[in-house]
Image: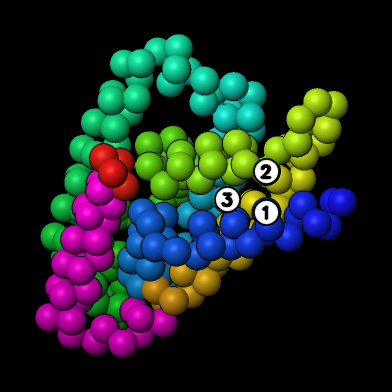
Amino acid sequence: MIMEWLWPLAGFATVSCITPGPNNLLLTQSGARFGFRRSVPHVCGIAAGMGVMLLAVAGGLGSLFSALPWLQPLLRLGGTLYLLWLGYLVATAAPLSREDGAATGVTPSPWLFHQAALFQFINPKAWLMSISMIGSFTLLGQEYWHSVAWLVAVFCLICLHSCLLWAQFGAQVGRWLRTPLAWRWFNGVMGGLTAACVVMIWH
């Protein structure tokens, strides 16, 4: 029974994590600008933040939206403004010269673990994934928290692997960007796609 339940859970988690969203776009940008190794804390922060969010939703955080109707539009507005701000910072980041060792852009350094973890709570895709998974893949009754534990473990493992792939992809892209013009185009595209994620909030 556990294996029959875990396979669809793993499939849903894989599709949810590997498809583009704010996390994956920011990891691509981080990998390109700062390299794979310096982006690892960002990767780990995402996985940890998602794990905490899943536990919070399983514990009843999702029900707050029903109890406090004003909370959802407030979260949407905050997420929209933050994503637009991130998109602007990414798009207008100065071209990176790897020779001089300068790491300028969204931040003077890659995102730290806690920054990436906290970002999940205003990330619209993270909320959608958490609520969908808790609502669809947890078991009822005495098995509820047992199933939550399995769900969080499986999801975080898949999320970690997926994020590592996106960071590595970004690092590879960074090796191809050898001119300031190429960096400007890359930053513009990444910034535009990050800002476009606001569609997820209002869809």
* Image: 200 above or below 16: above
Q: Which residue is mark 1?
A: 9
Q: Which residue is mark 2?
A: 137
Residue 27 percent across, percent down from the top left: 41, 62
Query: Is residue 132 rendered to the left or right of residue 155?
Result: left
* Image: 95 above or below 105: below
User: Nearest the camera: 14 or 7?
Assistant: 7
Q: Secondary structure at mark 1?
A: helix
Residue at 48% from the left image edge and 74% from the top image edge? 168
In the image, what residue type sits under mark 1? Answer: Leu
Q: Is residue 131 visible?
A: yes
Looking at the rendering, the stretch of residues picked out in magenta corresponds to 172-199
Answer whether residue 195 is magenta in the image: yes
Q: Which residue is mark 3?
A: 47
Query: Is residue 89 rendered to the left or right of residue 117?
Result: left
Residue at 87% from the left image edge and 51% from the top image edge? 1
Where, quadrant-wise, is the C terminus in this rendering? top left
Dot 1 or dot 3: first in sequence order is: 1
User: Nearest the camera: 120 or 116?
Assistant: 120
Q: Count the numbered circles shown.
A: 3
